[in-house]
Amino acid sequence: MARLGFTLAEVLITLGIIGIVAALTIPFVINKYNSKVFETEFKKANSVILRALDMTAQEYGATNFKELKFAFCGDLGQFDQDTDKQNACNESITKELPNINATLRNYLGIVDQEKITTNSYSMYNFEKDRFNYTNLCAFSDELSHLKCTVYYLKDGSSFLGLSYREAQFTLIFDTNGPRKNPNRLGYDIWEYEYPKWRHCGWCNMKNGNWMSGLGCYYCAIENVDSDNSDKGGYWQSLY
């Protein structure tokens, strides 16, 4: 007589196999999805910010943001060793920085702002060590480890005020804002700087320093593995 169904043992074995396969594949699928979300949010926020920086620079007669310093100081290449002229150039930019930031905020379309302190939010370096979010404030226009202003865009992303020190512009942005996790360098928190000083090697320093991850911007732009693991690119190397 033909059997019309499965025994309980067969059903349990089948369910066990399905469970094992799911346990092995679901984390991979979730991680791949999260990596794609981080990549999409980074590219979108970076594009918006770079465009706003270029438009801000054009207000000062520069073609794009990378030529903003030239608009203030001319071609410094002919007197790079002239400390007085270098200092005068840097002082003129620093003096104008509040107006540069106001113009940048206007082009970015700020919808909200928040003064944060050491008790406001946590952030994590690339290695997932926990620190105060205000560590990032040291790279804002307020140059403080204790407090600074976060500016929010309508899509939920945020940035800190553009800073200028040691002849370099720096801008920290968070693709989903400090109110939403993971608040982690190289995942949703990024540092753009010009002229470029940090490099991809700063991305995964494995030294417990809160700044481990500041160079991830360049790994992401170039789509280079953060740890030379040859996983197929930066975003694939996140998990």
Image (cartoon, rainbow, N blue to C red):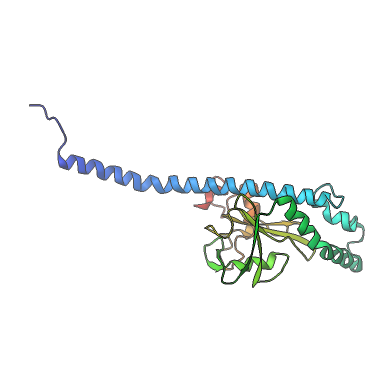
Q: Give the image location of residue 172, x and y in percent.
A: 67, 59
**Residue 29 relative to residue 122: left or right:** left
Q: Quadrant of residue 149?
A: bottom right
Answer whether residue 143 is visible to the viewer in this image: yes
Q: Quadrant of residue 68?
A: bottom right
Q: Quadrant of residue 103?
A: bottom right
State the residue lying farthest toward the left.
Answer: 1
Image quadrant containing the N terminus:
top left
Residue at 75% x, 54% y is 104
Q: Give the image location of residue 23, x and y in percent.
A: 35, 48
**Residue 96 relative to residue 158: left or right:** right
State the residue lying farthest toward the top.
Answer: 1
Residue 108 or residue 224, whichever sits in front: 108
Q: Give the image location of residue 215, x and y in percent.
A: 64, 58
Residue 238 or residue 98, whichever sits in front: 98
Residue 18 or residue 77, whichever sits in front: 18
Residue at 68% x, 71% y is 144
**Residue 121 relative to residue 107: left or right:** left
Tally the numbered discs. 0
Residue at 25% x, 45% y is 16
Answer whether residue 231 is visible to the viewer in this image: no
Height in image: 93 above or below 59? below
